[in-house]
Image (cartoon, rainbow, N blue to C red):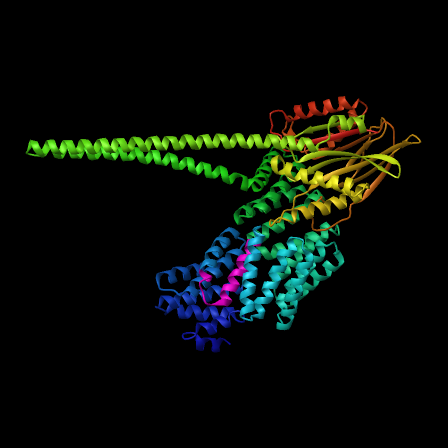
């Protein structure tokens, strides 16, 4: 093979390109030998491209990027064809992507898309569209990704390119998959599998097995998911596709700790994937896998490993530009510091997490303010330009006067003076007008900013009125739960936390449903989600007549998911919730039914100094990878027992002498110590304790605690 390749070395670089995957070392040696004696810059560029491809074949992305950049420099100095430029930028973007540098890869692919659209090489155009779509999807732009894929599909169909068409089907399926449209995803996966089977492309079939595994995992079919992941690993490993093995291992690890609760096996799978990402220097892959490992370390309460892994995950995610990964890593890192007792670090990192989380949610809201800021800068620039013009005019005037003094004839001097005077008056007048115009523009911009700010505050205040309308009044709560309290303290004007109550009657027996919920985010985004979730509760209970707490949670999950699926964005918003149903008193006993999504229920019986906790199902209301069924729990309580429902804002608040979190343990102790007091006094103690604990620290989240004496 080496001798055959050498015979083509000087004359046919395309032939060498065809042999890259079979003998990268040999091809690279030939390319370097020919490069030394080559004077033609276009051929030098071609050899650097060939060398880069050999390094790509060996997953050495740094060397590949180095030679692709050399190729780019050489072709820019010559007269490159359109296809040469497209191939160079496409391969360079792919190498940056494989290193996990998504921002650079995205920028290059956007540039490459424009060039490839002009190319007559339809196969190349199709490949660029597929890669651009894949990266757009990974960065959250799903509608854009689908547009690229369908355009590529049209090209593949027109040229009858079955291999590219199979790729199109596969990637279209992924978009529908992550948007939870499983039936459509299955349809496209099946079409892709049929074509890859016809072509005998077992490497792509191995990748599809992994996707089938994810599809089963998302639908709660854990056994089938495991089978597909293991088939993917086996097939990819037999073909030496270690990237495919790493991806399937990672997905199997997620399934182990989320669905099968096997933390040791999960860590084993994650570490195997991490070794591969490190061997290829893929910083994005490393950061994402480390976050998965952090979830397991948190469950195991291995706070040292959680901290060390978190520090590296934050660093790598920042380098890769993966903001969502950084957000998750910061949250878990704050919990590591908290577990280690390093409260100052925990508070600092948690604030960074909240800031990044809010910034990701509020990006669109800031665009209008940015535009106004730019307008203000432009207005300031206009004033500066006007002043510079006036100075320049004065300098010109001085020069004119000097020339006038040098004139020999007074008549010419007089005439020149008159002309100069007229010119000066004109310039001064024009400068004055421009300054006046710029000043007016600044005043208008400032007025506009003030108006917009007032409008925003008014809108948020009105949003508060709307949110208050969905919250039950104190009179309503007192009517149905006479001995109860709700301590409710939004972080901002409006909140993501809310509480809900409804009296229902079934088979002649009345009961009261009561819930405390924590929706995604806080402020305006959280409030918007709270309205959707509150409406879902009303619909499930009042319109559908569902009264059993666990069944209510199942139904509102469907409603919330259906609501957000109408958007082009991949919204995963929802809520954590505790929901109870309190029946009428019978034989001195009160029946209580409970179901929860992540949030627990606490019960203190009589004057007992112990608190009984029932944990909620480990999943939120909304989209979730594994659809665990919501479990219900029934109690028989005596009159006078206390029931508590709450969100995480109180326990997560930083403060005290050492600026640490309040924590659930402390909250339990506080409630046990005050449970025998009247409910109104309990609320006052909770409010004062929170205020004293917080001190001068910033409130980190919405707070809601409800206590009910049955």
Magenta residues: mostly which secondary structure? helix
Q: Viewed as shown, does residue 107 lie left or right of 576?
A: left
Percent x, y of residue 358: 58, 39
Vertical comparison of 19 with 535: above or below: below
| Tally of numbered discs | 0
Residue 575 drawn at (x, y percent) = 69, 41
Residue projecting furthest to the right: 587
Residue 650: in sight, yes or no? no
| Magenta run includes residue 646 | no
Compare residues 314 and 364 and report the one nearer the observer: 364
Residue drawn at (49%, 64%) of the image = 125
In the rendered image, the quadrant that contains the C terminus is top right
Q: Could you say which quadrant of the image residue 245 lies in?
A: bottom right
Q: Position of residue 334 (x, y in %)?
A: 63, 38
Q: Is residue 561 visible?
A: yes
**In the current view of this chain or complex, which residue is farthest to the left?**
408
As displayed, is residue 654 above or below residue 618?
above
Front position in the image: 460 or 104:
460
Read off the magenta span. 115-137
On whether residue 130 falls in the magenta region, the answer is yes
The residue depicted at 41 percent of the width and 75 percent of the height is 11
Residue drawn at x 80%, y 42% is 545
Q: Is residue 18 left or right of residue 170?
A: left
**What is the x, y in percent for residue 355?**
57, 37
């Amino acid at each position: 093979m080496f001798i055959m390749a050498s015979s083509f070395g000087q004359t046919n670089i395309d032939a060498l390109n065809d042999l890259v995957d079979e003998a990268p070392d040999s091809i690279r040696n030939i390319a370097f030998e020919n490069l030394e004696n080559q004077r033609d810059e276009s051929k030098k560029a071609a050899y650097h491209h060939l060398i880069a491809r050999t390094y790509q074949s060996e997953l050495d992305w740094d060397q590949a990027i180095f030679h692709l950049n050399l190729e780019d420099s050489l072709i820019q100095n010559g007269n490159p064809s359109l296809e040469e430029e497209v191939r160079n930028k496409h391969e360079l973007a792919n190498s940056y992507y494989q290193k996990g540098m998504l921002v650079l890869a995205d920028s290059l692919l956007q540039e490459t898309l424009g060039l490839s659209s002009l190319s007559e090489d339809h196969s190349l155009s199709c490949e660029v569209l597929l890669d651009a779509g894949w990266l757009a999807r990974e960065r959250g732009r799903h509608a854009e990704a689908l547009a690229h894929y369908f355009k590529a599909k049209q090209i593949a169909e027109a040229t009858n390119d079955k291999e590219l068409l199979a790729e199109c089907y596969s990637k279209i399926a992924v978009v529908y998959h992550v948007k939870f449209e499983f039936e459509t995803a299955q349809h496209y996966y099946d079409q892709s599998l049929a074509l890859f089977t016809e072509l005998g492309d077992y490497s792509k079939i191995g990748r599809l097995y992994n996707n089938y595994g994810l599809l089963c995992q998302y639908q709660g079919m854990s056994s089938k998911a495991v089978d597909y992941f293991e088939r993917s690993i086996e097939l990819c490993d037999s073909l030496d596709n270690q990237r495919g093995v790493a991806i399937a291992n990672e997905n199997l690890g997620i399934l182990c700790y989320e669905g099968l609760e096997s933390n040791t096996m999960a860590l084993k799978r994650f570490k195997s994937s991490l070794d591969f990402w490190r061997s290829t220097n893929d910083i994005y892959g490393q950061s994402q896998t480390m976050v998965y490992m952090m979830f397991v370390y948190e469950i195991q309460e291995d706070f040292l490993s959680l901290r060390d892994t978190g520090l590296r995950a934050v660093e790598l995610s920042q380098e890769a530009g993966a903001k969502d990964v950084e957000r998750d890593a910061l949250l878990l890192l704050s919990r590591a510091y908290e577990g280690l007792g390093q409260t100052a670090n925990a508070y600092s990192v948690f604030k960074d997490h909240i800031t990044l989380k809010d910034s990701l949610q509020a990006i669109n809201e800031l665009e209008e303010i940015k535009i106004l800021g730019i307008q203000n800068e432009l207005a300031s620039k206009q004033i500066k330009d006007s002043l510079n013009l006036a100075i320049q005019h004065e300098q010109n005037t001085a020069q004119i006067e000097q020339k006038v003094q040098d004139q020999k004839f007074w008549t010419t001097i007089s005439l020149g003076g008159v002309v100069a005077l007229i010119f000066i008056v004109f310039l001064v007048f024009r400068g004055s007008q421009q300054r006046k115009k710029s000043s007016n523009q600044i005043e208008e911009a400032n007025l506009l900013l003030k108006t917009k700010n007032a409008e925003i505050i008014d809108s948020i205040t009105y949003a508060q009125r709307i949110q208050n309308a969905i919250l039950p009044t104190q009179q309503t709560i007192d009517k149905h739960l006479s001995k109860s309290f709700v301590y409710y303290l939004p972080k901002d004007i409006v909140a993501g936390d809310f509480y809900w109550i409804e009296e229902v009657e079934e088979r002649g027996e009345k009961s009261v449903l009561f819930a405390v919920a924590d929706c995604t985010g806080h402020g305006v985004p959280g409030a918007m989600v709270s309205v959707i979730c509150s409406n879902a509760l009303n619909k499930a209970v009042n319109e559908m007549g569902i009264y059993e707490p666990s069944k209510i949670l199942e139904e509102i999950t469907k409603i919330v998911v259906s609501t957000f699926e109408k958007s082009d964005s991949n919204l995963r918003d929802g809520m954590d919730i505790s929901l109870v149903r309190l029946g009428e008193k019978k034989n001195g006993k009160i029946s209580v039914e409970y179901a929860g999504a992540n949030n627990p229920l606490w019960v203190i019986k009589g004057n007992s100094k112990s608190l009984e906790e029932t944990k909620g199902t480990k999943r939120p209301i909304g989209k979730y990878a594994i659809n665990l069924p919501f479990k219900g729990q029934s109690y028989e309580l005596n009159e006078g027992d206390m029931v508590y429902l709450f969100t995480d804002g109180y326990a997560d608040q930083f403060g005290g002498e050492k600026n640490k979190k309040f924590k659930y343990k402390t909250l339990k102790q506080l409630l046990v110590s005050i449970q025998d007091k009247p409910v109104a006094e309990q609320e006052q103690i909770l409010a004062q304790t929170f205020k004293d604990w917080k001190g001068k620290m910033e409130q980190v989240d919405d707070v809601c605690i409800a206590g009910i004496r049955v």
